[in-house]
Image: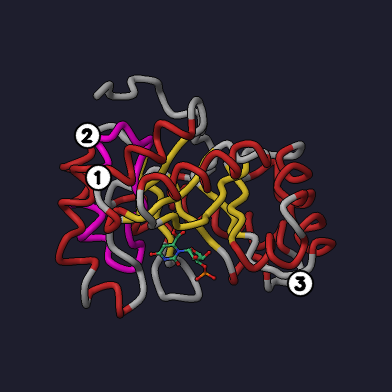
Amino acid sequence: MAVRLLQATMRVEHRLIVALDVTDGGRARSIARAVRDRVDALKVNWPLVLAAGPGIVKELATLAYVLCDFKVADIPNMSRLIVERAVAAGASGVICHGFAGEDSVRACVEAAGRSDVFVVTELSHPGGQEYTAKFAEDFARSAVRAGAAGIIAPATRPERVRVLRTIVGTKLILAPGVGAQGGRAADAIAAGADAVIVGRSIIESADPAHAVEGVLAEIKGPRAT
Ligand code: O7M
């Protein structure tokens, strides 16, 4: 089967993706407008889509790269249908789970066309160590074989990001778990992540744009001018 040779569509410049984990479309729009110039993507998950409707994806896509975090994990036919709908709704990237198997990941990549697919390896919360960690390296290998744009790896365990980087080479690594879950953006980037994914510590801030600047300063570290 053909391996997708296209480069990732996502351009990583700021090294920060904001997770719009809110259930109010108005709040999502207002955060998106406030941060869009300083982040690489807006990540949208089920709570927002279920509350505001799929039209919110198209709307946000006029402002920034929208990464639909639908954590697709079904048989290939269903995975394909979900990814096709996400892309039609305006997603530039879609997230799927590695544990559904390489055939399902491959179906996602094929359905995504020119949009990116990112594969979850090891989940960032404590329970992620129970099962996903045991197979994270296999998930990363199958993501590479299936032609995914990159993987999701835990900022809460930078040492795991370091190991997964040796497997995925130049594929993108996006690392959630910064702030509310205890991870540090600078540690995840130093371990080899291309970008961090941050939700609550930005979206629950009274001034999300200011909170974004705080994360960006941490990523740049002491070398920042
Ligand atoms: O910063 P938080 O903790 O408020 O939010 C973290 C976001 O990252 C939230 O949207 C989660 O769905 C997501 N995430 C994790 O927290 N851990 C993971 O292991 C994987 C993800 C994720 O983005 O998967 C694609």
Reply yes or no: does residue 9 show up in magenta. Answer: no
Question: Which residue is rendered at x = 22% and y = 44% of the image?
Answer: 165
Q: Quadrant of the N terminus?
A: top left
Q: Is residue 45 above or below residue 35?
A: below
Q: Which mark is residue 102?
A: 1
Q: From the top left corner, tell me how far across and down residue 161 is, in percent.
A: 26, 54
Give the camera-side residue of 11 and 46.
46
Image quadrant of residue 141? top left
At 53% from the left edge and 61% from the top edge, which residue is drawn? 198
The amino acid type of the residue labelled 2 equals: Arg
Residue at image position (15%, 66%) is 134
| Residue 54 image point, x, y percent | 72, 52
Q: Nearer the viewer, mark 1 or mark 2?
A: 1
Specify the segment rendered in magenta: 143-163
Q: Are marks 1 and 2 in contact (CB under 8 Å)?
A: yes
Q: CA distance from mark 3 to mark 1?
A: 42 Å
Q: Nearer the viewer, mark 3 or mark 1?
A: 1
The amino acid type found where label 3 is placed reads: Ala
* Whole-percent x, y for residue 119 in the image: 35, 49
Who's the residue at 69% across and 68% down the image? Answer: 22
Residue under numbered circle 2: 145
Give the amino acid at mark 1.
Answer: Glu
- The residue to which callout 3 is attached is 206
Disc 1 and disc 2: Cα gap in Å? 8 Å
Categorize mark 2 by other alpha carbons within 10 Å: few (<14), some (14-19), many (20+). Answer: some
